[in-house]
Image (spheres, rainbow, N blue to C red):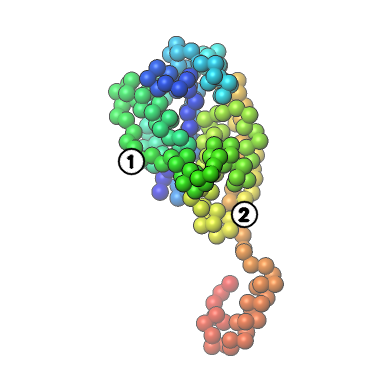
Amino acid sequence: MREIVFDTETTGLDSRLDRIIEIGGIELVNRFPTGRVFHHYIEPQGREIHPDAAAVHGITNADLAGKPIFQQIADEFAAFIDGARLVAHNANFDIGFVNAEFARIGLSPIGSDRILDTLVLARRKHPMGPNSLDALCRRYGIDNSHRTKHGALLDSELLAEVYIELIGGRQAALGLEVVEQTSRIGMSDAGISIEIVRRERSLRPRLTDEEKAAHAEMVRQLGAAALWATATE
């Protein structure tokens, strides 16, 4: 199963008037990241960034000078998400903006049947909250200390980890060991640098040496004809 965990940053809250200024996405296949990402800063075509929005994401109109307009990246984004389920936190907001941008250039909207909202999942699983992305990172022990401002690519990376936890991915993965790898993605085109801590998962045994020894003794006592005696470790 192919999924895209994505996020947007915008000039404000009204998708009828405001514009997307950053969009980022992470590809998952069978709930594991493939390494494919999508990321663009976008020039809002004269729409000024509201001060309240700038306080959240830290992006200014000056940062976006010379960046592509949405129409110039729309086909690339549409190809990246083609055939995939889309995962977002408070998805109505992000999809509302994407569909508004699509409508302006004559592209078909993204249907609600393709959307999975992690905020809805979180509220079902943790009805007492809080269920913001930062709160869920704290709940699941995901390092978000480098998240001083919102950013579409960084938030997608964090949300992908939160999503796996929300659907029980750690338990279903039979004890996957988390190995941290830190990389820095330079967003020089907007004067912004983001450090992402990637967690790669590798299979580790659940049994201790003592438990293995006890199991081997139990198999020995069963006798040579026992099925366990012919099983490989």
Q: Nearer the viewer, mark 2 or mark 1?
A: 1
Query: Could you tell me residue 127's position as x and y percent?
Result: 50, 45
Percent x, y of residue 184: 63, 33
Residue name at image x 42 percent, y 21 percent: 14
Q: Residue at x 40, y 32 (%)?
A: 92
Mark 1 = which residue?
Answer: 113
Which label was assigned to residue 20? Answer: none
Residue shown at 29%/29% (left/top)?
108
Report the residue at 41% width, 39% height from top. 86
Judging depth in this view, the residue of 106 and 140 nearest the camera is 140
Instruction: Give the residue furthest to the right.
Output: 210
Callout 2 amino acid? Glu
Rendered-image quadrant of the C terminus: bottom right
Observer able to see residue 227 = yes
Report whether 136 appears left or right of 83: right
In the picture, the disc for residue 177 is 2
Mark 1 residue element: helix
